[in-house]
Amino acid sequence: MIKIKESVEFVKSKLGGREPVVLGILGSGIGFLGDMVEDAVYINYDEIPNFAKSTAIGHKGRFVCGTLAGKCVLLMQGRVHYYEGYSMDQVTFPVYVAAGLGIKNMIVTNAAGGINTDFSVGDIMLICDHIKLMGESPLRGENKDTFGVRFPDMSCAYDRDLCDLARKVASDLNITLREGVYFYALGPQYETPAEIRAMRILGADVVGMSTAPEVIAANHAGMRVLGFALVSNMASGILDKPLCGEEVIKAGAAEKEKFSALFIKCIEGFEV
């Protein structure tokens, strides 16, 4: 808790009185949203006490705070992952810092592999639920009583009202919005075809290496969560081709206009 307070105070000192109401976590290939913020202040993670450094491809590793869609936002241009060698505490630390700043809403995004064979590269999926069967919980250890209860409910991890908002926004923008379940995998290796088949049997529609730990922490801290997955590639075994990290970045760039419109209009519709 002391480390979180130190980081909160440092970030506050850099915001110049700004009071963000939405935390946005920008996944691989989606960092361009941070460049759309007006009157922006940038805070590199390596400046912030107790923060981990982002090493993933295409992740700038900084907070961007300013105005987007008429609201004060705090965007993460890059996150840290468990596969980078960090603990779950480190992976979810920025979420608790955001909660310590008083932020009550979070939009989490990611690039994911498509498991559902009805999906195509470039599709955007509204995350309605997730499956996390591997790795420790980010809530393991002494409970952060200031933020939430020991055993938080996860039956509505992705806020139903915010999901309804996303559906309406997508309809208004004439964007096809897929819906489904995100499967959290530890990485950094991509999954085998057999693992993908197992995930499909379990009910997963996409797979990725982030998001679930942050969503668990956000729910623990009482934040409302909206989640989007950009299908950046079809998962292992679906197409007869190898997978690589570069195609994730390319997919984000290709869908920049569509993803930006959806993200920004959802923020505009937030009641804060």
Image (tube, rainbow, N blue to C red):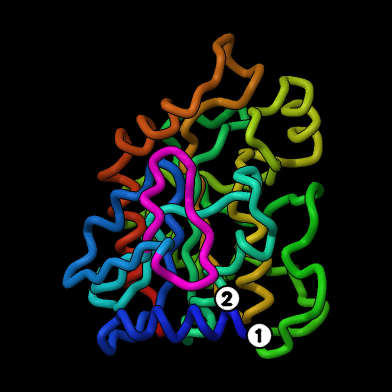
Residue shown at 29% from the left, 58% from the top: 34
Query: Residue 141 placed where, x, y %?
Result: 82, 72
- Residue 150: name its quadrant: bottom right
Residue bearing mark 1: 147
Relative vertical location of residue 240 with respect to residue 255 in this rendering, above or below? above
CB atoms of marks 1 and 2 within 8 Å = yes
Kindly report the secondary structure that dominates the magenta region of the rendered protein. Answer: loop
- Quarter holding the N terminus? bottom right
Mark 2: amino acid: Tyr
- Residue 14: name its quadrant: bottom left
Horizontal placement of 131 versus 73: left or right?
right
Q: Which residues are magenta?
A: 47-62
Query: Label 1 vs label 2: CA separation?
Result: 8 Å
Residue bearing mark 2: 96
Q: Which mark is residue 34?
A: none
Q: Secondary structure at mark 2?
A: helix
Q: How many marks?
A: 2
Q: Please say whether residue 89 is visible from this viewpoint.
A: yes
Residue shown at 38% from the left, 56% from the top: 77
